[in-house]
Image: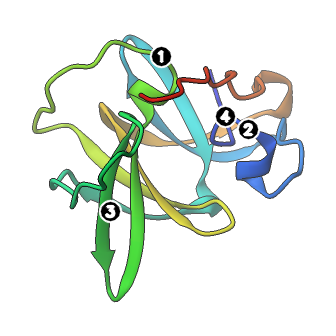
Amino acid sequence: RAAPGMGADAAAGGRHLAEGGEYLTFRLGGEEYGIDILRVQEIRSYEAPTRIANAPAFIKGVVNLRGVIVPIIDLRLKLGFEDIAYTEQTCIIVVDAGKEIGIIVDAVSEVVEIAGANVEPPPATPTQPGK
């Protein structure tokens, strides 16, 4: 499933994103997702971020990338998947969603060309107050 945004139109600059094009695909659980390659700033191996007190569980903390403080979100938790231990394949995709954010994914797959008819809207993100 190609999910071009971050689960909300606001995270994608307010525009509807069911468009074809090149997508970086990644895995969460047994599913394949994608994000518009033009939004990807970099792919990094996982490194533990600096924790933020009282943050929801899906916000793992922040990292300093060349002087820019970037929040790190565990996309698995944000989308309601089961929490698992990180592996060597776990990585952080730094994306431009109006500002830079890092999303933790199970693994990055490849860059693929996807026709607009095959792109589904992003999944709804569950609200998890206090988590």
Residue kind at label 1, given as amino acid type: Gly
Q: CA distance from mark 4 to mark 3?
A: 20 Å
> How many residues crowd mark 1 within 10 Å: few (<14), some (14–19), many (20+)?
some
Q: Is residue 87 above or below residue 70?
A: above
Identify residue type, mark 3.
Answer: Val
**Residue at 42% over, 60% down:** 71
Seen as rendered, the residue at the extreme bottom is 67
Q: Is residue 1 above or below residue 47?
A: above
Q: Which residue is mark 2?
A: 8
Residue 4 in the image: x percent, y percent?
68, 40
Residue for badge 3: 62
Q: Quadrant of residue 29?
A: top left
What residue would you read off at disc 1? 80
Name the amino acid, label 4: Gly
* CA separation in Å, label 1 and label 3: 21 Å
Q: Residues within 10 Å of mark 4 (few under 14, many from 20)?
A: some
The first of marks 4 and 3 along the sequence is 4
Circles 2 and 4: CB distance less than 8 Å?
Answer: yes
Sequence-first disc among 2 and 3: 2
Q: Foreground residue, 26 or 66?
A: 66
Per the image, label 2 sits on a secondary structure element best described as: loop
Q: Which label's residue is closer to the chain start, 1 or 3?
A: 3
Decide which of tag 1 and tag 2 comes sooner along the chain: 2
Quadrant assignment, res 77: top left
Residue 115 location (% of width, % of height): 78, 33
